[in-house]
Amino acid sequence: MKKKFSLLMAVLMLAMLLAGCGGDKDSGSAPADTSAPADASAPADSGSSDGSGASAVAEDTNTVAVGAVVIARDDVPEDDIYAFTSAIFENIEAITEQHAKGGELDLDFASSVTSVPYHPGAAKYFAEKGKEVASVKDGAGSGDSKALTFGTGGESGTYYAFGGVLSNFVSNSTGVSVTAITSGGSKENIENLAAGDVQLGFVQSDVMSYAYNGERLFDAKVENFSVVAALYMEQVQIVTTNPDIKSVADLAGKSVSIGDRGSGVWFNAVDVLSAYDIDPDTGISPVYLGFADSTENLKDKKIDAAFVVAGAPTTSIVDLATSGPVYLVSLDEEHTNALLEVSPYYSAYTIPAGTY
């Protein structure tokens, strides 16, 4: 009897031991460190996994941003631009279901551009909604109607992804046919639009101003375009896989991708680095790459950091974050204010935690 009782007790104890080990499969791992870094300019950390293999940035990232604006050739008919604009802003909810950037569409922001006049077709729509634009382009909107080509950006950027959604939506819901194509971005879109190769284009608001005034990227004024709408903010994102890069100052002496020389991204990088007294030619080891190539080089540890200027979340950074920890470097308040003072076309912006 004693032997049977002892055997029964042993079985019961073994069962209890097994039950205690059979709950959370990850219970044996160390708990995640959720403490925020003491340095406010430390990079936002994406090292914690959400269980899907992708990592999520756990801290807000303080940076600056410019506007993402759609422009059109002046000779695109007023009715076509009216249809394009109304199709977008009358169907924000449906567009948001196809791309998250749709959730940032806002009539006040869309009609807020002051540096370049609006196309009459867009101005007409905004006026109907009680939004008066700063100026309207005289003589624009009188050309012949035809299928429209929309210059966007690289395949891994927000311009192309969101531009494709907008083009498909407008084409399917109006009598205006719009086709989105890839491009080299803002500067190329303006050049192609001026040459008549495209009729619509995505541009950064600062690059648009450079073109219209014949500054920086442009040796002469480009004035045969007008504004359709400002759609969302594009954040200057400084991306690294190196946790030791905790501020912009830490980029000194590092290999950094700053966009194609003379591109909008390049000027954004120059502005930010200069605010920290870092010469973009000698203070870092500059590499001139687009978004996709930058993230591939980060993944392969060929560069230390990269400037990416696009609406967050950006496809190339999302893809990079699936391969390991990614960090976004914040700008501190002192240097942000100094940058805004000399470059008023920027706005301070915070990328919320969890965007990546």
Image: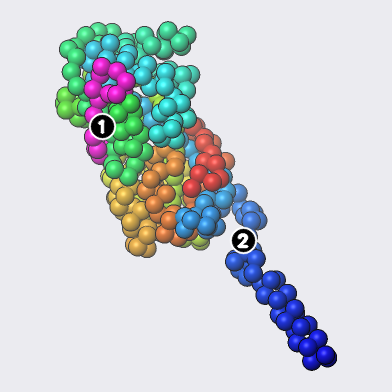
* In the image, residue 180 lies in the stretch drawn in magenta: yes
Q: Is residue 27 above or below residue 272?
A: below
Label of residue 54 in the image: none
Return the residue nearer the eye: 91 or 199. 91
Q: Is residue 179 visible?
A: yes
Q: Which residue is outermost to the front?
A: 1
Magenta region, residue range: 170-190
Q: Is residue 79 above or below residue 60?
A: above
Q: Which residue is mark 2?
A: 32
> What is the tally of numbered marks visible in this picture?
2
Image coordinates of residue 139 in percent, x first then y, are: 25, 8
What is the three-letter code of the residue carrying label 1? Ala
Point out the tag, 2 or 1, that comes first from the N-terminus: 2
Image coordinates of residue 16 in percent, x first then y, are: 73, 74
Label of residue 180 in the image: 1
* Residue found 48% across the figure and 48% down from its top: 356
Q: Is residue 30 visible?
A: no
